[in-house]
Amino acid sequence: MKIKETFEKGEGVLRLIPVFMPIPFSKAGFRLRLHPDDYYALGTRRGSIKERWLSSVMPHRNDPLAKPDEGLSYVLPFNEKAEEKFTLKEAVDVLGKEIVGEELMQKYGGWPMLSKFIDYGAPLFHHLHFGFNAAAEVGRLGKPEAYYYPPEMNNHEGEFPVTYFGFDPDVTKEMVKERMLRYEEGDTRITELSRAYRIELGTGWYTPPGVLHAPGSLLAYEPQWNGDANAVYENIASGEVIPYEYLAGNCPEDRKRSMDYILSLLDWEKNIDPHYKKHYFRRPLLCEGSNEKYTEKWITYGNDYLGAKELRINPGQTVTVKDGAAYGCIVIQGFGKFGVYDAEAPVIVRFGQPGNDEYFVSEAAAQRGVTITNNSRFQPMVILKHFGPNHPQMPV
């Protein structure tokens, strides 16, 4: 079977094919390194491509025009015959604990998260992701998520590099409800009740479920749980009218017109936290083991669901880097080797084209250590790594 053969020949590492995703709202930021002719690869009805999904076992379920396998990461077989590709989900189903480890299989039945590059040229609308209890009512999962803003992927800031989170601490539920009841009447200007932070490159945030956020216009690396139920509280964003369906579309049928129910999706205390930045802003933390050959930093940490690191290997160096858990990763700068595979961050990619920049590393391979070579004489090789909740060294 190609799955086991590829897994064994890759020494527990799988090479993934890029997954670019069209989104029907907002505008593209053009920083995904996708060929300019391919931003409407799935047609104009689907919108321009604004996201790349990484290490995904979750299909896209919020667009009725999406194909059943859209959003799923595919693995390029070791023989590099793309027509024999298989999904990462199929690999996890076949290999089980051999690839993700016993803990993740027992607790979650597989790989519980993915990461994304989200690349919007304009700021997104103020929205939240359902908590786990509310999501379960509609057969979904809650969605905690995090952001990191890699300088290597942000050659421009877009229109508004500022992110809103929650509400000002003095805002009341009644003030929010009064505006939300006018959702279909005119611009509610909901972000007038919020607070905003200028995005700092090389830093990030953690966003719990139930917290409103309107991401700014920088490209973000976004580790997140396998959940996709959301509610959009802003009805006009960057001049674009947001239909009521975006607010209530994921709610139970009998509560789509209940503003009290919709407001109950808010984790109110977190939304009005007077020390929101202190609790959820994330500066990188240097990892133990960093030395003159490489530097590794935690960029997502301090939560019960997700972790992520930035690995920076100096020019001309070969290193073996160990981790305590399975992970997905992507090379965003440089070229060389990643385990048995060639590795390179592309300058430009065609839609559907395989690459050498994205991998999934099994738990056993991570614990043995992956040997990585930076073949550049002058530039560091930069890799972003995303983990589930079980990395034993993730800072709390």
Image (cartoon, rainbow, N blue to C red):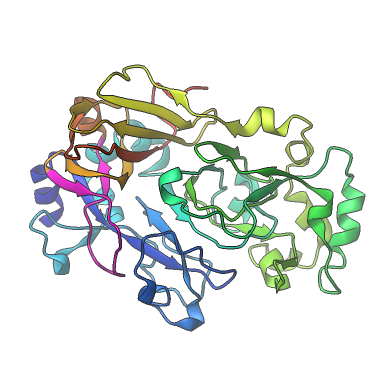
With 235 as the anchor, is 86 left or right in this view?
left
At 48% from the left and 73% from the top, the residue drawn is 48
Q: Quadrant of residue 278?
A: top right
Q: How far across and how far down the image is residue 353, in percent?
A: 24, 66
Residue range in magenta is 341-362
Is residue 293 inside the magenta stretch? no
Question: Closer to the camera, 287 or 250?
Answer: 287
With 77 as the anchor, is 378 left or right in this view?
right
Looking at the picture, does residue 72 appear above or below residue 161? Answer: below
Q: Quadrant of residue 248?
A: bottom right
Of helix, strand and loop, which mostly describes the magenta segment? loop
Is residue 359 inside the magenta stretch? yes
Question: Closer to the camera, 274 or 29?
Answer: 29
At 40% from the left and 33% from the top, the residue drawn is 309
At 68% from the left and 46% from the top, the residue drawn is 210
At 41% from the left and 62% from the top, the residue drawn is 59
Question: Closer to the camera, 272 or 163?
Answer: 163
Question: Closer to the camera, 81 or 355?
Answer: 355
